[in-house]
Amino acid sequence: MSSERVPRVILPATAETTDSSIGSIARLLRLTLLVAITMLSIWLIGDVIMVVFAAALFAVILHGMARAVHRRTGISNGIALVIVCVLLVAIVVGISWTSGSDIVAQAARLKDALTTQVIALRNQLEAWPQGKILLDYLPASLGGNGGGSSNSGGLMSLGSRIAGSMTGFLGSAFGVLGTMAVVLIAGLYFAASPALYANGMLRLVPHKWRGKGREVMLVAADTLWAWVVGQALDMAVVGILSGVGLWIIGVPLALSLGFLAALCNFIPYIGAILGAIPACLLALSLGLRETAMVAALYTVVQFFEGNVMAPLIQRKAVSMPPGVTVLSQTFFGGIFGAPGLILASPLTAMLLAVGDRLTPKLDDDERI
């Protein structure tokens, strides 16, 4: 019984299949090109992006305050913005006129006290065998011996980083002060005519997507304003509690340290550590008991802020998962440097709100 061999037939690809494959490849190439252009733009003009975002954030603050004045008084938004700007300038000038010299003196005293305490701490570590081992392993930039060299460059570097980092940052007058001037002026113009700039950006969006683009811009502005209000309240509470607590313990320069804690709290989580380090260093001059009390004070304040204040603020303002917040600080700090670290939280809050509006909600059977 013979069996015939059936030849295998290979069907040619249809025109529809070929067009679909070409279309998929073209979409993939466009997406790759878009991602490459975006990453290259971020790498080339990252500083400009941060300046634009800082100006937009400042404009949101001015516009939000002017809108609050408009709602309470009924005057026009333009006059309300003028009143807000005049009040802010008057507050800054008044503080500078009445307390400017005291603020500068407090800052100088804080810098000198921190530098002195860092020197004393290093001397104590060098007199302790385990401390000498620790200094040998620490790099010079952190006050160590830089792998065994016992020069004092690391100490001065550490003192400069802790006590005079802001002074060094302000040393580049043209760069920093010029950037601040650009942010303030651009933010003022943005706040004075927000519709003009928003409509100009919408004209760059394809017509079929302009409705969604308008919705995204409104969501981003509302989210930034809610974040600013919540963060301002959070900073005020942390600064007051820290300053009063340090004053009760007897730590010198408690007012300056409380103000520093409030400023550092602008950066969630990382800022809390940065604000606690100077207070603990100064408390070392009083003794280990006072140092432990200061550490306990900052721990209690941050516990209260994270478990009482933050839920209340997030209920009315912006809710961000802690893990996302920390990772965003690492991500934006690595890309944009110090400005990215400082502005990571409002930028992340805005991106989360925009993403929540653009992406569909999960059904109950889709949730994990």
Image (cartoon, rainbow, N blue to C red):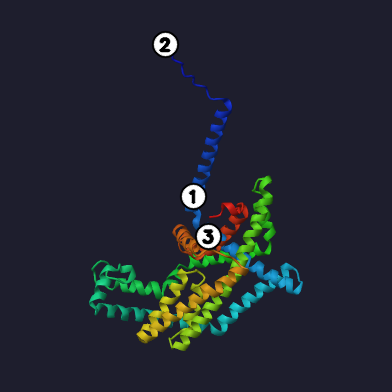
* 89, 344: nearer the viewer: 344
The spot of residue 350 in percent (x, y) is 58, 60
First in residue order: circle 2 vs circle 3: 2
Q: Are marks 3 and 1 in contact (CB under 8 Å)?
A: no
Tag in front: 2 or 3 = 2
Density class for disc 3 (Cα within 10 Å; few <14, some 14-19, many ≥20) is some
Q: Position of residue 101 (x, y in %)?
A: 51, 83
Task: Give the residue drawn at x 53%, y 60%.
Answer: 50
Residue 279 position, x and y percent, is: 42, 80
Q: Name the amino acid type tagged 3.
A: Met
Against 77, residue 285 (above or below) is: below
Classify residue 153 by image quadrant: bottom left
Name the mark on residue 39: 1
> Hey, what amino acid is under mark 2?
Ser
Residue at x 43%, y 72% (from the top left corner): 273
Tell me which amino acid carries mark 1: Met
Tell whether label 2 touches label 1 (CB within 8 Å). no
CA–CA distance between discs 1 and 2?
A: 67 Å
Q: Relative to 179, does residue 206 appear above or below in the rendering?
A: above
